[in-house]
Image (tube, rainbow, N blue to C red):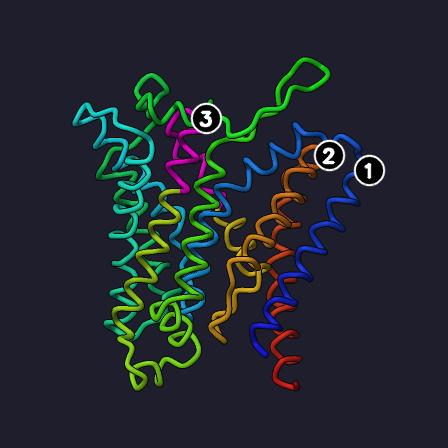
Amino acid sequence: MKKKFAMNEVITRVMLFALILAVFAAIEPTVLSATNLFSMINDAIFNGVAALGMMVIMITGNFDLSSMSISMLASFITLKLYRLLGYEGDFITMFLIAGAVGALIAMINGYLAHKFDLSGFVVSIGTNLIFGSVFFTFLKSSYIKTDAMPQRLLDVRTSSLLSIKIASGTTANLNIGILVLIVTAVLLWILLNKTQIGRGIYALGGDKNAVERVGYSSRKITLLAYAIFGACVSIAGIYFYSNAGTFEPGLIADKGSDVIAASIFGGCNMKEGKGSVGGVLAGVAIITVIRSNLILLGVPVYYITFAVGAIILLGVLVSSLSEIRMNRN
């Protein structure tokens, strides 16, 4: 019953995405151009990978505000390691290193939340400031300009999975980074739906007191969930900076709201241990199509920020109403 209900929620969000896209296309036909569609998909890669990580800890009943601080810190450490060692390597190795660094950083939050029985949300308020301070003060971070970025990483922004020539003579490119999102989504779907670990993650979010009684370790599951979260936001971060071609901290700092909005509107619910890969991807698609096309239409940034905030509140409301409906059934 719950799986059927969850699938209905995903379908509803996909239909909503199609409706929103159709409305924008009616206002501005170029919305459906290959250039704009590929641009939206490329924009969704960061939010998608990061939101999937956020989904995992939300399923366990936690929430974390330090995602962008972790992402920046892990990306910076990874880039500094590469410069220090003088190693170019390949971008896949760089993504994996960033993920490992981010996992270790995020596990600090998980350890504190579990060890002292604290809300992950409260813990992340403090660690967000600490991670930010380490990043900006102790590491003396600033710009890492294009000529100082590893060339293999810069190659990511010019590598295309698919290219389509437009009549105007330009080319629409689908960035190879979409493979990172696809692989992340597939691996997390398998983990959550086909493994004992996945059942433990859902069990922890559903009833924290009962999870130990059915043979799961709440400490191990919490730490694993935070490790996955940290790895995802850090991989998303290193991808983002590869596309930007430079390491400027401020570029990523304000993207946290979109990640949160996509997770919540995608159906993640901390109270019930709810969340699905399909739902989150649909939430990412909705957030991306709204933000990208409002920018295309020349809407001022503060109106776009208002829209994202409204989507977060709407997501909470929809989740609450869905919960009421399910309980009645």
First in residue order: circle 2 vs circle 3? 2
In magenta, the rendered stretch is: 236-255
Q: Residue at x 44, y 49 (%)?
A: 50
Under mark 3, the amino acid is Arg
Relative height, residue 25 to residue 158 (above, below): below
Relative height, residue 299 to residue 198 (above, below): above
Say which element carries label 2.
helix
Disc 2 and disc 1 in contact, CB within 8 angstroms: yes
Q: Residue at x 60, y 54 (%)?
A: 282
Q: Residue at x 21, y 39 (%)?
A: 138
Under mark 2, the amino acid is Val
> Residue under circle 2?
31
> Residue under circle 1?
27
Mark carried by residue 73: none
> Residue under circle 3?
157
Chief secondary structure of the magenta portion: helix
Q: CA distance from mark 3 to mark 1?
A: 30 Å
In reply to whether residue 250 is colored magenta, the answer given is yes
